[in-house]
Image (spheres, coloured by chain):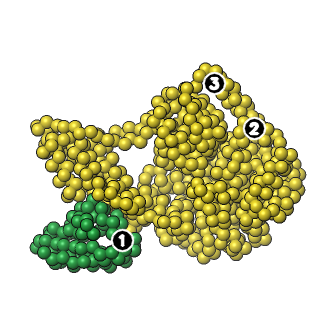
Chain colours: A yellow, B green
């Protein structure tokens, strides 16, 4: 029995077998061939280079089609590597003179060629090594016959990994995931967010766990405290199983609210929706009784296959989403990426300050063709079910106007082409920049709804990078500066006669959700796992009481004061809720990540 | 052997996309072309070689060419490095 201590990133308790996930990183030793095999090895090398070149060229032409020549160029370096005179001469020489196999020779030549890059002191330039390593892996895979070496998830398991990429997570069957134990990362990493959405425990920052655990070892994971026990003793295991059982009963009690609306005892109704990152999370949202999807992130559809989806592919994906949400409304947020995120995956463009950079609507407006394809797909999908469209990272009224112009153009095209679509699709914006809060009255006049993105809004209002561990503690949505901004935004929306929602982790905290309700928020969208608890909170506190909370907290000066106030109130108003979760306040009641 | 000096026109420096374009351009010539930045000498037709040059905006690199079309090659590469790269990025 061994204990490990990490950081709890998604609450819950689980006991089950491990599946150790590793990246198929091929390394080859110095393997020799016979003199008679040299010719064959040289041919194998050429075939593998050809295959890889085809792969990369295919990817390039797709990028070219969607983003234009300028962006497609980022793949050129990788393609050029396959024809690199110095590299290929060294590889062929190693096969012919040292009698190495094609794989060994190629790996050796790559290793030598990358030495000067490793010696470079600059991080920005050193990252290009990764781009070349990626090509190396592709060639080595091609030499092996292209077999996929990823382990298979065939039974319910706890995924143990050094780190998972979004495409790794996307390839896993969510119904078989019991939890995650990750060596790296923080509570806001991609895997942690997925875990919270799936409602399974996740512990991050476990350092070398993935090297110490074998597939099928039994793990005991506490996603709240961050404790992981490997192969626990019988008595420990039994006690833990008891805890798991008690907790499950409490959760089931909450879930019994599934078909009840989020209405306060004095009859005030709030729409309670779920944030969805991957389509596989939709069933959990529906099971937990969400009124709809308040934030459907569309990035997944773009990164799933490592290539940009065309209009027909997007249309099919959006239809599938609307099918799964059973007629409940879905707010699709158009592609929200930083230019750096989209492009750095393939080398090339990087920013020193991506949060203040070329992202969200800014990126889309400099790539109007990309936006057009997505809007057309969304409008065409609108005949399948109720959908709304949301624009990310708006910081200026002019941006909203430009998007609307493009939308009008798309609708004209669709009409001309005879594609059916729903008239009057609502278009709203994310309010997540201080400038959008300041201009909320003007923005409200020109769009159909607001959704306050509290994760980013808090970061920008407080000027805190929440991924920076030294200042992350200052990232608090309960800070009066954030609360005042939210109140101001809601009021501006209502003055202009539009509705105002909120999507962000903040809405998953029961006492903050009650506070938001008191501010007059019309819709709260949060991670699917938190929906039942938030619903219970709203059903427990009268609207008039929540309004009093707002009055009191808006008069306070610090986040500590607000948190203290809410703690005292919640002990009265939300006691049941807190008791049921005494096992460790769940992701939603704990500190915001 | 003809040698010229060019200053990196691209504000981001000699990044990978720029390096790719230099390799593509160099390959259009029969001459052997090398680019030197500080103490590092790289084959202009090798992406791995160019990737090892960490040259920043406006820093000088030295280009040498040897072969039948050496002069044209130098002229074309200087134009690319000083001007064309700056324009498209």
Of residues A523 and A187, which is closer to you in this image?
A187
CA distance for labels 2 and 3: 20 Å
Question: Is label 2 or label 3 in front?
Answer: 3
Q: Which residue is mark 1?
A: B56
The chain carrying label 3 is A
Residue at 38% x, 41% y is: A24
Q: Is the residue A549 above or below the residue B6 in the image?
A: above
In which quadrant is the N terminus of chain A drawn?
A: top right
Looking at this view, name the residue that lies furthest to the top.
Answer: A234
**Position in image of residue A563 (x %, y %):** 77, 54
Element type where label 3 sits in the image: helix
CA distance for labels 1 and 2: 57 Å
Could you tell whether A130 is left or right of B45 in the image?
right
Residue at 60% x, 64% y is: A392
Q: Which residue is mark 2?
A: A582
Mark 1 on the same chain as mark 3: no
Residue at 54% x, 32% y is: A157
Of residues B56 and A522, which is closer to you in this image?
B56
Q: Is the residue B76 above or below the residue B43 in the image?
A: below
- Tell me the quarter of the picture where residue A461 sits: bottom right
**Position in image of residue A402 (x %, y %):** 57, 74
Q: Which residue is mark 3?
A: A236
Residue at 78% x, 71% y is: A495
Q: Is the residue A67 above or below the residue A20 in the image?
A: below
Element type where label 2 sits in the image: loop
**Position in image of residue A240 (x %, y %):** 66, 27
């Amino acid at each position: 029995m061994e204990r490990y201590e990490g950081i709890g990133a998604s609450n819950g308790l689980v006991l089950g077998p491990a599946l150790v996930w590793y990246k198929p990183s091929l390394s080859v030793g110095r393997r020799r061939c016979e003199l008679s095999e040299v010719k064959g090895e040289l041919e194998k090398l050429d075939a593998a280079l050809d295959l890889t070149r085809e792969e990369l060229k295919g990817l390039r032409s797709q990028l070219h089609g969607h983003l234009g020549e300028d962006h497609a160029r980022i793949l050129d370096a990788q393609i050029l590597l396959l024809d690199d005179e110095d590299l290929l001469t060294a590889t062929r020489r190693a096969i012919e003179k040292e009698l190495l196999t094609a794989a060994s020779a190629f790996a050796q030549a790559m290793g030598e060629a990358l030495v000067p890059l490793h010696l470079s002191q600059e991080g920005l330039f050193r990252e290009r090594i990764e781009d070349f390593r990626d090509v190396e892996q592709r060639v080595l895979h091609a030499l092996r016959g292209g077999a996929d070496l990823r382990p298979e998830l065939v039974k319910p398991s706890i995924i143990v990994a050094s780190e998972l990429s979004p495409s790794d997570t996307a390839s896993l069957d969510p119904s078989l995931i019991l939890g995650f134990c990750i060596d790296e990362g923080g509570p806001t990493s991609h895997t942690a967010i997925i875990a919270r959405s799936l409602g399974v425990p996740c512990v991050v920052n476990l350092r070398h766990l993935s090297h110490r655990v074998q597939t099928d070892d039994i793990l005991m994971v506490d996603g709240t405290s961050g404790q992981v026990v490997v192969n626990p003793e019988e008595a420990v295991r039994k006690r833990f199983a008891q805890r798991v059982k008690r907790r499950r009963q409490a959760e089931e009690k909450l879930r019994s609210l599934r078909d009840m609306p989020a209405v306060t005892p004095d009859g005030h109704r709030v729409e309670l929706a779920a944030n969805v990152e991957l389509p596989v999370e939709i069933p959990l949202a529906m099971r937990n009784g969400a009124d709809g999807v308040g934030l459907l992130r569309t990035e997944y559809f773009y990164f799933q296959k490592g290539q940009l989806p065309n209009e027909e592919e997007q249309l099919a994906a959006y239809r599938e989403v609307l099918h799964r949400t059973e007629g409940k409304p879905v707010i699709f947020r158009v592609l929200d990426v930083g230019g750096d995120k989209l492009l750095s995956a393939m080398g090339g463009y990087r920013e020193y300050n991506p949060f203040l950079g070329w992202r969200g609507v800014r990126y889309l407006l400099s790539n109007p063709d990309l936006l057009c394809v997505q809007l057309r797909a969304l409008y065409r999908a609108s005949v399948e079910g109720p959908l709304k469209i949301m624009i990310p990272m708006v910081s200026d009224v002019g941006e909203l106007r430009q998007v609307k112009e493009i939308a009008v153009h798309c609708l004209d095209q669709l009409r001309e082409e005879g594609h059916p679509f729903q008239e009057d699709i609502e278009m709203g914006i994310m309010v997540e920049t201080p400038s959008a809060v300041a201009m909320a009255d003007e923005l409200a006049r020109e769009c159909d709804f607001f959704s306050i993105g509290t994760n980013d809004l808090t970061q920008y209002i407080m000027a805190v990078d929440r991924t920076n561990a030294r200042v992350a503690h200052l990232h608090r949505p309960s800070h009066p500066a954030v609360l005042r901004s939210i109140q101001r935004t809601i009021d501006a929306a209502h003055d202009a006669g539009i509705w105002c929602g909120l999507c962000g982790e903040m809405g998953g905290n029961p006492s903050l959700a009650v506070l938001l309700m008191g501010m007059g928020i019309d819709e709260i969208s949060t991670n699917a796992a938190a929906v039942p608890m938030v619903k219970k909170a709203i059903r427990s506190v009268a609207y008039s009481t929540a309004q009093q909370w707002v009055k009191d907290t808006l008069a306070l000066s610090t986040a500590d004061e607000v948190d203290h106030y809410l703690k005292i109130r919640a002990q009265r108003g939300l006691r049941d809720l807190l008791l049921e979760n005494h096992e460790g306040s769940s992701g939603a009641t704990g500190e915001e990540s | 052997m003809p040698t010229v000096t060019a200053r990196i026109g691209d504000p981001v420096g000699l990044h990978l996309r720029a390096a790719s374009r230099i390799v593509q351009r160099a390959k259009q010539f029969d001459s052997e072309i090398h680019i030197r930045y500080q103490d590092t000498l790289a084959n202009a037709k090798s992406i791995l070689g160019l990737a090892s040059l960490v040259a920043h905006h406006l820093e000088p690199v030295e280009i040498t060419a040897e072969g039948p079309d050496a002069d044209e090659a130098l002229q074309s590469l200087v134009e690319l490095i000083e001007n064309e790269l700056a324009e498209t990025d």
